[in-house]
Amino acid sequence: MPTPDATWTPLELDALVDAAGPSWSVYLHPTATSTNALAAENPVPGTIVVADHQTAGRGRLTRSWDTPPGTALTFSAVVDPGLADHDWPLLPLGVALAVADGVTGASGVRLDLKWPNDLLVPDPDGEQRKLAGILLERVTGAEGRPLAVIGIGINVGLQEAELPVPTATSLAIAGSSVDRTEVFGAVALALRLMLGSLRREPLAILERYRTECDTIGREVSVELPDGGSFTGTATGLDRNGRLLVGDQAISAGDVLHVRPT
Ligand code: BT5
């Protein structure tokens, strides 16, 4: 990974606390392995663990999430969603909407939502590149309540030469010079609002996601957890947020947007 830009400004706890507002307790680590791992050690609802730099950021399955110091937001929010078990699958969709709301609100950069919770920005050639990723883990809190650790990684200031993979992008590359703390505050607020809506009206969040998800209507290639794969047109979402592709309902698996020729 390239060395960071010498001019980067470290995150400051007071500024993050102000930006997040009174409903969150914020903890800042200058360096951490993975904020999801830290948050899951002693999960307390209403806390957000932020790392200025992650040394072993996790993606889904065994994948990693890599960002150079000072260029990205990497944090995990612990929440008690207060949802019935059958509505938990809607949580990742709601989180994706909230991250998109926060990022777009702070930066003006419009994002495409790839099911279930990747946030993409088209480059000048129309190729969709990944700006943010979400890793949602279900853990058990005090008294045995199920809690969600919502890990969010957002590429803010990375330059082309700093991208960990060619399929990545950043807000800076998309033309925004917004600062990390501002994006953090906007996402923390959007997350709180979304959790309230999801609790009150889970089906309204599902409907909004259906309307805004860029995957629906596209030709997609699906890689299933058992190693199988197939391609087809994504036609919609079912009540549980599963993606409908041909005659299959996908709940877990990697979906790639196949570029129209
Ligand atoms: C994700 O996994 O997209 C979830 C990423 C979640 C990261 C946050 S950061 C805070 C919290 N603490 C953690 O330890 N994790 C969470 P997945 O869909 O599996 O995507 C991983 C893949 O994205 C990798 O295999 C790379 O191809 C690519 N990738 C890695 N780093 C990236 C980056 N910074 N930007 C865009 N793509 C990246």
Image (cartoon, rainbow, N blue to C red):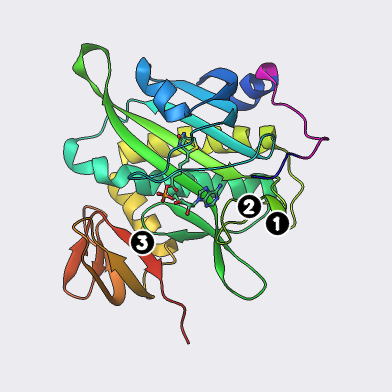
Count how many numbered circles sit on residues in the image. 3
Q: Quick check: 107 left or right of 61? A: right
The earlier-in-sequence mark between 3 and 2 is 2
Q: Position of residue 223 (x, y in %)?
A: 28, 64
Is residue 195 covered in magenta? no
Above-or-below relation of 179 to 119: above
State the image coordinates of residue 226 (x, y, percent, origin top left).
18, 57
Look at mark 3 in the image and give the residue it sits on: 210
Q: Amino acid at mark 2?
A: Leu
Q: Residue at x 29, y 73 (%)?
A: 235
In magenta, the rendered stretch is: 5-14
Q: Is mark 1 within 8 Å of ligand 1?
A: no
The location of residue 256, given as percent across then percent down, is 39, 67
Q: Determine whether label 3 and label 2 are within 8 Å by CB.
A: no
Some atom of ligand 1 lies within 8 Å of the CB belonging to the residue at label 2: yes
**Vertically, is 151 above or below 46?**
below
Q: Do labels 2 and 1 touch, CB within 8 Å?
A: yes
Picture quarter containing residue 74?
Answer: top right
Q: Position of residue 2 (x, y in %)?
A: 69, 45
Query: Nearer the observer, disc 3 or disc 2?
Result: 2
| Residue hosting label 1 | 160
Q: Real-space Cα distance between discs 2 and 1? A: 6 Å
